[in-house]
Image (cartoon, rainbow, N blue to C red):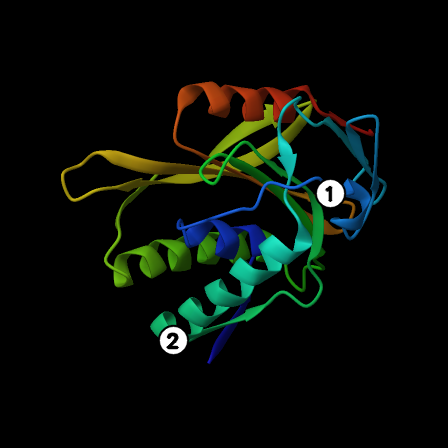
């Protein structure tokens, strides 16, 4: 059975049928690394700071773990792919509602050969697309491009999930970069332009320690 490093937020977001309880939570208990102070999340390992938008709720570890486990089952049963997320760390994640969610994570990644990280991410995109198709989901994928965030180059790709009629249900954008020996990723899940802009502004206004 093939093994590959996958990102938890992708299992989490692949399910699409997300229902969250609205409750006040301590953000510092929902992350594996870094801390939150005055609406600002800081990751020491990545050297990253981001301002959490006003009016957005923190995603709890309980919520993300629940959908992570279900996502791993889907990949294993449908594609024969075993998910290894044993070293993955939840960073900050926040949501407006069940369709508009910002998820970030990191995981140690040491390349055994040049280009291994890029190949892993190409495999990730391929298996996600196949997972959608095998589950009868009408999905389009976007080409991988390079975007610049606070002076750093990130790889970006995404998926658009549609009804059989062609109407868009959900969009996903993923931003990934190898930073300080960690595969760092942000996934933005949205169904309207207003919330998309809020999440993209938070990401592109965020800062990385040089």
Q: Determine whether 86 is above or below 154 in the image.
A: below
**Mark 1 residue crowding within 10 angstroms, few (<14) / some (14–19) / many (20+):** few
Q: Position of residue 191 (x, y in %)?
A: 39, 31
| SS under mark 1 | loop
Q: Which residue is mark 1?
A: 25
Q: Residue drawn at (28%, 61%), measured in percent from left and top?
A: 135
Query: Would you identify the image quadrant in which residue 52 lies?
Result: top right
Q: Earlier in the sequence, mark 1 or mark 2?
A: 1
Q: Quadrant of the C terminus?
A: top right
Q: Nearer the viewer, residue 67 or 137?
A: 67
| SS under mark 2 | helix
Could you tell me if residue 71 is visible in this image? yes
Q: Is residue 66 left or right of residue 81?
A: right
Q: Mark 1 or mark 2: which is in front?
A: 1
Q: Determine whether 124 is above or below 178 in the image.
A: below
Q: Residue drawn at (63%, 44%), measured in percent from left and top?
A: 59
**Mark 2 residue crowding within 10 angstroms, few (<14) / some (14–19) / many (20+):** few
Q: Position of residue 49 (x, y in %)?
A: 78, 30
């Amino acid at each position: 059975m093939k093994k590959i490093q996958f990102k938890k937020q992708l299992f989490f977001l692949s399910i699409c049928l997300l229902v969250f309880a609205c409750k006040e939570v301590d953000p510092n208990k929902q992350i594996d690394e870094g801390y939150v102070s005055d609406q600002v999340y800081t990751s020491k390992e990545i050297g990253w700071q981001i301002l959490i938008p006003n009016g957005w709720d923190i995603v709890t570890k309980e919520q993300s773990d629940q959908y992570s486990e279900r996502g791993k089952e889907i990949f294993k049963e449908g594609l024969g792919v075993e998910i290894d997320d044993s070293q993955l760390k939840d960073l900050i994640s926040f949501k407006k509602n069940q369709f508009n969610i910002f998820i970030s994570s990191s995981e140690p990644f040491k390349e055994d050969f040049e280009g291994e990280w890029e190949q892993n991410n190409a495999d990730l995109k391929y298996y996600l697309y196949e997972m959608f198709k095998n589950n009868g989901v009408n999905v389009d994928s976007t080409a991988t491009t390079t975007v610049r965030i606070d002076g750093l180059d990130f790889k970006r790709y995404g998926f658009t999930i549609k009804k059989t009629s062609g109407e868009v249900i959900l969009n996903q954008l993923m931003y990934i970069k190898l930073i300080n020996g960690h595969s760092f990723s942000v996934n933005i899940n949205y169904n309207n332009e207003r919330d998309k802009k809020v999440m993209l502004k938070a990401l592109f206004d965020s800062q990385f320690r040089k």
